[in-house]
Structure formats: C-alpha cells, structure tokens
Amino acid sequence: MLTVVFLLGYLIKRRKARLKNAALSFSTGAFALFLLIVAEELFFSYNSKNKKEVLVASREAPIGGILLKLYEDSTYEIGVLREVRSAGTFVLKSDTLFITATDHPKQNNYITQISFIIKDGYLEQIENTGIGFLEIHVNKLK
C-alpha cells in the first residue's frame, strides 16, 4: 500500500525521491514476504524429517481437506494441511495401495487401515470410510 502512495506521489510531482521511496518500500515488502515463506518452511513444514516423497495425493473440502504423503522408506502420513493425523506403513501390490497405521489413530478418531486402487491421476478408496478419492499430484511409485 505504501508503495502505491509513493508511486502516485512520483507520478504527480515527478520527484525522484518518491520513486526511490517506492522502490525501497517494494523491496522491503518483498524481502519480508520471502522471510515469512522461508520461516514457514523451516519451522512448520509438513515433512519435518525431509524424507523423499514417492506419492502425494490430496482432496480439498470446505471444512478440511485430506493430504496423503507416501515416502521412500515405505512410511506414510495422512492428515489435513499441516497437521498429521495418522502415520504408518504402506504396501503396494500391483495397482492396489494398502496403508496401515502404526501410531494410535483410534485415539485421534482416525482410520487404522485403508486400501486404495491407483487409477489415472487419482486414488480411489476401496472400502468407503469417508475419504472416497484423492487426486495424485506426485507419483514416483514403481
């Protein structure tokens, strides 16, 4: 907002000091935004252990979406946006994905076992427990 004020001041009075102030204001705002993004990734990252993802699938919903991440070491995390609700291991057999929770998801009112069929660009849940389907964003599964 301050950048716009300085730019308007420059356009009206044609003083280079106002243009310099606009550039400085814009640079400061861009740098602050960059710092916020870096801080969020460093301190609030969903994948805090920096594991290599082999599959990322999600579904958006008005109340809360679902995010599923499968990792190279045959582990997974499922939850909403930045909160992991359940974690465990997965097994891939042909085009079917089986995930089993190793934490205590019943305490979190979450699912202990889920099976998905991998189709073109999405995962379709075999037994409907409320997830239904997830759109695949990254798929490096073999």
Image (cartoon, grey):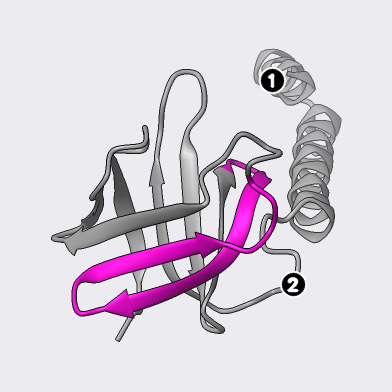
| Pick the front one: 130 or 44 | 130
Q: Quadrant of the N terminus?
A: top right
Residue at (75, 16) in percent of width and height? 5
Residue name at image x 40 percent, y 47 percent:
58
Query: In the figure, residue 10 lies in which quadrant?
Result: top right
Residue type at mark 1: give it: Val
> Number of numbered discs present?
2
What is the x, y in percent for residue 13? 74, 16
Q: What residue is drawn where x is 47% and y is 33%? A: 65
Q: x%, y% of residue 35?
A: 82, 51
77 on left or right of 70: right
Tell me where residue 43 appears, x and y as whole percent.
84, 55
Position of 87 with respect to 65 (left or right) is: right
Among the 4 quarters of the image, the one containing residue 137: bottom left
Reading the image, the residue beneath label 2 is 49
Which segment is the magenta one? Answer: 80-105
The residue labelled by disc 1 is: 4
